[in-house]
Structure formats: C-alpha cells, structure tokens
Image: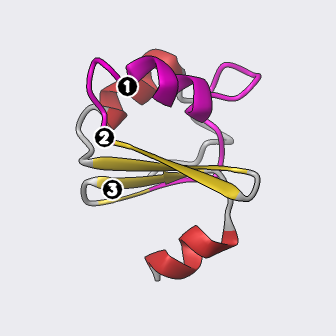
Amino acid sequence: MSDARKEKINQDQAWEIFSTCRIIHIARGKSVLSFQPDSNTKEDILKAAIGRSGTLRAPAVREEDVMWIGFNEDIYKAAR
C-alpha cells in the first residue's frame, strides 16, 4: 500500500502497475470505463487514469488483479 500524497505515481510507473492487472475500472464523473490492459488499450487507459498533474488520479485501489481509479460511489459499493 502507498500514500499518493507522499509517493506520486507517474505515467510510466502507472503502466507498470496496470499491465499486471486483469481489469481496470476508471470512474469519470457518473460513468465508469472498464479496460483489459494491453498494447491496444494502453493510450486510452493512461489518458483516463492520469490526471492534469501528470500523476495517477486518486483514489486508486488495487485488489489482487483488479484496479479501481477515481471516485464513483457505485464502484465502491460493488467492491465491498
């Protein structure tokens, strides 16, 4: 576990993490995008997951091989 306030995760570091996941869910407002990471989806995933600061958006939670990025109440209810 890491604290994003103390340890920023840049685009390259984020892709290293994403490439080991089976699925990535990214909240964008009320919508949720789901991706299976591979070379064809890399650009779309990074565009959605990296914030304006150039680092991984928060919150970002990984459980085994599934990752949730951004806040959406429905995703977090489903994750419980």
Q: Secondary structure at mark 1?
A: loop
Residue occupying image coordinates x 70% and y 29%: 51
Which of disc 3 and disc 2 is earlier in sequence?
2
Quadrant position of residue 48: top right
Q: Residues within 10 Å of mark 2 (few under 14, many from 20)?
A: some
Q: Residues within 10 Å of mark 3 (few under 14, many from 20)?
A: some
Does residue 40 appear left or right of residue 25 in this picture? left
- What residue is disc 1 on? 41
Q: Residues within 10 Å of mark 1 (few under 14, many from 20)?
A: few
Q: Amino acid at mark 1?
A: Thr
Q: Amino acid at mark 2?
A: Gln
Quadrant position of residue 10: top right
**In front of the other: label 2 or label 3?**
2
Q: Amino acid at mark 3?
A: Val
Does residue 5 appear left or right of residue 39 in this picture? right
Q: CA distance from mark 1 to mark 2?
A: 7 Å
- What residue is disc 2 on? 36
